[in-house]
C-alpha cells in the first residue's frame, strides 16, 4: 500500500522518537557509552566545539567544575585536559541527568548556565547565543561521542600576534584560526578564550581588546589545548614627540632603541661618572668604590675609562665572592641539609669555578654529572640538597632551563605546553640517582631534614617514577624531547654508549643547540645587571610569558654560545651598553616605563651588600659567630650561621634575615626578598649592627678625627666613602656647621655618618 508524504513524515518522526528513547535508555540504565552514530557534515563536534564552549564559559576552570573536587557534585577536567572523562561526566554521571535527548532545551547543561535554574556560578551564556546553540544541537543530534573520529586540533594562529596602538587608536580586534589534523582550518574567534595579563586592557568575548590605560599587556588566546600570546602596547599620542637619535655601543642598544622609538619614548641620558662607578662596583663586587678610587675615576678624561674599570672589576677576587653568592642561593647551599663541612666545600667549589673562569656550560655539566662523596666531590651536594627525583627535576628545569614545571605535576600545565606525561617522564631521568648516608650526627632528632655527616651520591641500576595518572612507570625523557627521537648527546660528545644517565643529561642540557639553556642563562645575567629579566620572572620561560625584547634575547643567547658560554664576556657586553649606563631619572616620555630599559631601574641593595657596605663605610669588619673576623656577609658560605637550640641569633645574622637573605630552601630568585618593612627601618635607625659599627673605637671615624684634617676635608672624605660623590655646597655647609657647634666632635661625626647610612642614596642602587 502506498503511503502519503504525511504518513512517511509521521513514521520518520515516530522512529526518531523511538531511537532517541533507546539512546536515552542506554544512558540511563545500560551503563554503557553512547553508541557512535554517523554524523552529518554540519554536526556539532563534542571534541572541537562542545569542549570549547565549556572552556569559554568557564565551566572547566579551576574556580568552577574544573576544581579538583568539582562543584555541586559535578566535576570536569581542568581546562578540558581529559575530554574522555568530561564526556562521561556529562552523559553518564548520575544516570545522565545533565542532558535530555527527548527535550534538549530541558537539559541541565543548558538550564544551569543560562540561569533558567538557579546556578551558583551565575549566568555563563544566554539562550539563543552561539554557545547555547552548539550545546543544544549536540544534544538534539544524540550527544554523539566523536573523540576518536573528529580531527584533532594541531595549532592556532592569532592575528595580530603583536601590535602597537598609538592614540587615538584604543582597540584591536583579534582573530583566531584553528588548524586541524585533516588539513582543514576554521575561524574560532567566537569559541576562543581571551585573558589579559594586567589591567592595561580588557578583552571582550568576541576578541575585541580595548585599552583601559597606557602601557603594555599580553592577551592569552586559548582554544582547546592550544594557546597563543598576543603582545599589545597602547601608546599615548605625544604629538610633540621627537626621537633623539643616540649612538649605539653594541647590538643591545640597537634593539633597545628600536622598541623605544616605536613606543615614542626617549631614553634617559647617560648617568654621571660617580653613579656609574658606584653601580658597577655594587653589581660586580657587592661593595662600594674606595674614596680615592672614585675621585681618580671622575678625574680621568679617557673616553674608554668605563670599559677599563669594567675589565678591572671582573678580575678582582670580590667578583668571585659576589657571583658565587648568587649561585649559592640557587643551588641551596645551606647548613641544615649539607652540614657545615659540605656547605663550605660546595661554596668553595662554586667560587673557585668563577675564579678559574670556568665556562658556564662546563660548570653545569660538572654539577649535573657529579656523584661520589659530598665532601670530596663538592658538586655532588646539588643532589644532596635536592633529595628526590621530583625535586631534582623541578630544580634543574627551573635553574638551568628557565622552566617552571610545578603546575604539571597534578594536571597539564594551564599556561604552558607541558603535560603530566612530560613532567613525570622528565622526573624519571633522575630516578636512579641515589645516596648513601654514611653517618648522621644530627643535633635535632625531630628534624628529619637535618643531616650532619658524609654522604655518597651514586647512580643505581634501577629506579623509576610512576605517573599517577596512568599508574605506570614513566619513561625517562629529556624535557621537550619526543620519546622516539630523544637526542642524548651533543655532536661533539662521546658516543651515547659511553655516557651514563647523568652524563647524557649534562651533555644534552649544555649543548649549543639547546636553546633552553643559553637563553635562560643570559636572561639570568641580564636580570642581575639590569634589575629585570627580558623574560620576567626570569625562570618562567613560556609562550604565554613572552620576552619584552625577543630578538635581543636571541641575539644575547647566540653571542653567549659563540663565546663559549663565557660569563665575563656577557657581563662585559651588557655593562658596556648605553642601556646599562643610562641614568635612573626618567623623562616625560618614559616616566611610567618599567619594561623597556628607557632608564635604569632603582632597587634596594641586597641584604649582604647593605651590611658589607655599612662595614666598609665604618671601616671595621663585621663579626659572624663561628667565622673569623673580617669575613664579609657576601663571603658567607651558607644561608645562616648555625647556632645551638635556645641560642640567640647574632646581630649581623639578624640584620641579614630582616633584609631578605633567603634560607635557600627553594631553587628560585623569588626566595630573596627585596621588600621594605618597618623592621628594616628600625634596624637602620637603632639596630645594633649600625650603632656598633659607628661607635667602635677603631673605626674610620676615629681615624678621621685623629688625622688632624679640617672639618670640610673630613666631611668630603665621608661623602666620597659612603655616597661615591662630593657633598654639595649646601650639604658641606650644614655638616661643617654641625661639627663646629657640637660639644663632642666624635658624637657629631657619628651623627653625620648615621645620616649618610640611612640616606636613600646609600640604601638604593641607582
Image (cartoon, rainbow, N blue to C red):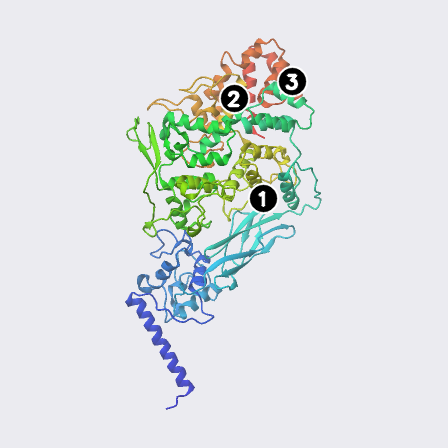
Residue designated by label 3: 733
Front residue of 320/443: it is: 320
* Residue at x 47% of width, y 70% of height: 42
Nearer to the camera, 668 or 365: 365
Residue 763 visible here: no
Query: What residue is shown at x 52% (from left), y 24% (from top)?
Result: 318
Sequence order check, earlier mark of 2 and 1: 1
Nearer mark to the viewer, of 2 and 1 = 1
Q: Around disc 2, counting alpha carbons within 10 Å, would you say few (fewer than 14), some (14 to 19), or many (20 or more)?
A: many
SS at mark 3 in the image: helix
Residue picked out by circle 2: 614
Along the polypeptide, which appears first: circle 2 or circle 3? Answer: 2
> Residue 239: x and y, percent?
70, 46
Residue 36: image location, x then y, percent: 37, 69
Q: Secondary structure at mark 2?
A: helix
Looking at the rendering, which quadrant does residue 714 occupy?
top right
Q: Residue at x 38, y 52 (%)?
A: 67
Label 1 belongs to which residue? 549
| Among numbered discs 3 and 1, the one appearing first in the sequence | 1
Report, in whole angstroms, how far the alpha carbon at label 3 lies from the one at label 1.
47 Å
Q: Which corner quadrant of the image does residue 552 belong to? A: top right
Among the 4 quarters of the image, the one containing residue 709: top right
Would you say the residues marked 2 and 1 are in contact, meaning their CB atoms lie under 8 Å apart? no
Q: Left of 465 or right of it: where is 124?
A: right
Residue in the foreground of this view, choosing between 473 and 279: 473
Q: Quadrant of the N terminus?
A: bottom left
Q: Which mark is residue 533?
A: none
Amino acid at each position: 500500500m502506498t503511503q502519503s508524504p504525511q504518513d512517511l513524515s509521521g513514521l520518520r518522526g515516530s522512529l526518531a522518537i523511538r531511537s532517541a528513547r533507546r539512546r536515552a535508555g542506554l544512558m540511563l540504565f545500560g551503563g554503557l557509552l553512547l553508541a557512535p552514530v554517523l554524523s552529518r557534515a554540519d554536526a556539532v563536534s563534542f571534541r572541537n566545539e562542545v569542549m570549547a564552549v565549556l572552556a569559554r564559559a568557564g565551566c572547566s576552570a579551576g574556580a568552577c567544575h574544573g576544581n579538583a573536587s568539582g562543584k555541586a557534585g559535578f566535576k570536569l577536567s581542568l581546562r578540558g585536559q581529559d575530554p574522555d572523562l568530561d564526556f562521561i561526566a556529562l552523559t553518564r554521571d548520575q544516570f545522565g541527568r545533565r542532558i535530555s535527548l527527548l527535550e534538549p532545551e530541558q537539559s541541565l547543561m543548558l538550564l544551569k548556565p543560562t540561569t533558567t535554574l538557579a546556578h551558583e556560578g551565575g549566568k555563563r551564556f544566554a539562550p539563543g547565543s552561539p554557545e547555547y546553540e552548539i550545546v543544544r544541537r549536540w544534544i538534539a543530534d544524540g550527544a554523539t561521542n566523536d573523540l576518536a573520529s573528529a580531527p584533532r586540533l594541531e595549532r592556532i594562529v592569532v592575528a595580530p600576534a603583536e601590535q602597537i596602538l598609538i592614540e587615538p587608536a584604543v582597540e584591536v580586534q583579534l582573530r583566531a584560526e584553528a588548524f586541524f589534523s585533516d588539513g582543514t582550518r576554521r575561524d574560532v574567534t567566537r569559541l576562543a578564550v581571551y585573558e589579559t595579563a594586567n589591567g592595561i586592557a580588557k578583552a571582550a568575548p568576541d576578541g575585541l581588546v580595548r585599552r583601559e590605560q597606557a602601557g603594555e599587556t599580553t592577551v592569552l588566546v586559548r582554544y582547546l589545548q592550544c594557546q597563543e600570546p598576543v603582545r599589545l602596547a597602547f601608546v599615548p599620542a605625544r604629538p610633540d614627540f621627537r626621537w633623539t637619535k643616540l649612538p649605539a655601543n653594541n647590538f643591545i642598544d640597537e634593539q633597545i632603541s628600536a622598541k623605544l622609538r616605536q613606543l615614542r619614548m626617549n631614553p634617559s641620558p647617560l648617568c654621571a661618572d660617580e653613579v656609574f662607578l658606584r653601580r658597577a662596583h655594587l653589581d660586580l663586587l657587592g661593595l662600594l668604590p674606595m674614596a680615592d678610587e672614585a675621585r681618580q675615576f671622575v678625574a680621568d678624561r679617557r673616553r674608554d675609562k668605563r670599559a677599563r674599570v669594567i675589565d678591572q672589576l671582573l678580575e678582582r677576587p670580590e667578583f668571585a665572592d659576589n657571583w658565587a653568592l648568587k649561585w649559592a642561593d640557587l643551588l641551596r647551599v645551606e647548613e641544615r641539609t649539607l652540614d657545615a663541612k659540605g656547605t663550605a666545600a660546595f661554596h668553595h667549589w662554586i667560587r673557585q669555578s668563577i675564579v678559574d673562569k670556568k665556562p658556564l656550560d662546563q660548570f653545569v655539566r660538572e654539577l649535573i654529572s657529579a656523584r661520589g662523596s659530598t665532601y670530596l666531590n663538592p658538586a655532588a651536594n646539588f643532589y644532596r640538597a635536592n633529595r628526590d627525583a621530583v625535586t631534582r627535576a623541578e630544580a634543574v628545569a627551573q635553574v638551568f632551563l628557565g622552566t617552571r614545571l610545578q603546575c604539571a605535576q597534578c594536571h597539564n600545565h594551564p599556561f604552558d605546553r607541558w603535560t603530566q606525561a612530560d613532567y613525570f617522564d622528565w622526573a624519571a631521568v633522575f630516578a636512579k640517582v641515589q645516596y648513601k648516608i654514611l653517618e648522621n650526627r644530627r643535633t635535632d632528632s625531630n628534624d628529619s631534614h637535618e643531616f650532619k655527616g658524609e654522604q655518597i651520591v651514586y647512580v643505581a641500576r634501577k629506579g623509576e617514577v610512576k605517573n599517577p595518572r596512568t599508574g605506570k612507570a614513566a619513561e625517562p625523557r629529556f624535557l621537550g624531547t619526543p620519546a622516539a627521537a630523544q637526542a642524548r648527546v651533543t655532536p661533539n660528545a662521546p658516543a651515547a654508549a659511553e655516557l651514563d644517565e647523568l652524563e647524557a643529561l649534562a651533555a644534552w642540557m649544555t649543548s649549543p643547540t639547546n636553546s633552553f639553556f643559553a637563553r635562560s642563562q643570559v636572561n639570568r645575567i641580564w636580570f642581575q645587571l639590569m634589575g629585570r629579566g627580558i623574560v620576567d620572572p626570569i625562570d618562567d620561560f613560556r609562550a604565554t610569558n613572552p620576552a619584552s625584547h625577543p630578538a635581543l634575547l636571541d641575539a644575547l643567547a647566540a653571542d653567549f654560545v659563540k663565546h663559549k658560554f663565557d660569563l665575563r664576556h656577557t657581563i662585559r657586553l651588557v655593562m658596556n651598553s648605553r642601556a646599562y649606563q643610562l641614568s635612573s631619572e626618567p623623562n616625560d616620555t618614559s616616566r611610567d616605563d618599567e619594561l623597556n630599559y628607557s632608564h635604569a631601574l632603582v632597587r634596594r641593595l641586597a641584604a649582604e651588600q647593605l651590611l658589607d657596605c655599612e662595614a666598609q663605610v665604618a671601616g671595621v669588619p663585621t663579626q659572624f659567630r663561628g667565622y673569623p673576623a673580617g669575613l664579609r656577609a657576601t663571603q658567607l658560605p651558607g644561608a645562616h650561621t648555625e647556632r645551638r637550640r635556645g641560642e640567640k641569633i647574632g646581630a649581623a645574622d639578624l640584620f641579614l634575615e630582616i633584609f631578605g637573605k633567603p634560607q635557600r630552601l627553594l631553587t628560585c630568585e623569588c626566595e630573596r626578598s627585596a621588600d621594605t618593612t618597618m623592621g628594616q627601618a628600625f634596624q637602620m635607625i637603632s639596630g645594633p649592627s649600625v650603632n656598633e659599627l659607628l661607635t667602635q673605637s677603631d673605626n674610620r671615624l676615629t681615624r678621621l678625627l685623629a688625622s688632624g684634617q679640617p672639618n670640610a676635608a673630613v666631611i668630603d672624605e665621608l661623602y666620597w666613602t659612603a655616597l661615591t660623590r662630593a657633598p654639595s655646597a649646601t650639604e658641606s655647609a650644614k655638616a661643617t656647621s654641625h661639627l663646629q657647634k657640637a660639644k663632642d666632635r666624635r658624637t657629631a661625626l657619628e651623627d653625620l655618618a648615621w645620616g649618610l647610612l640611612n640616606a636613600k642614596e646609600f640604601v638604593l642602587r641607582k
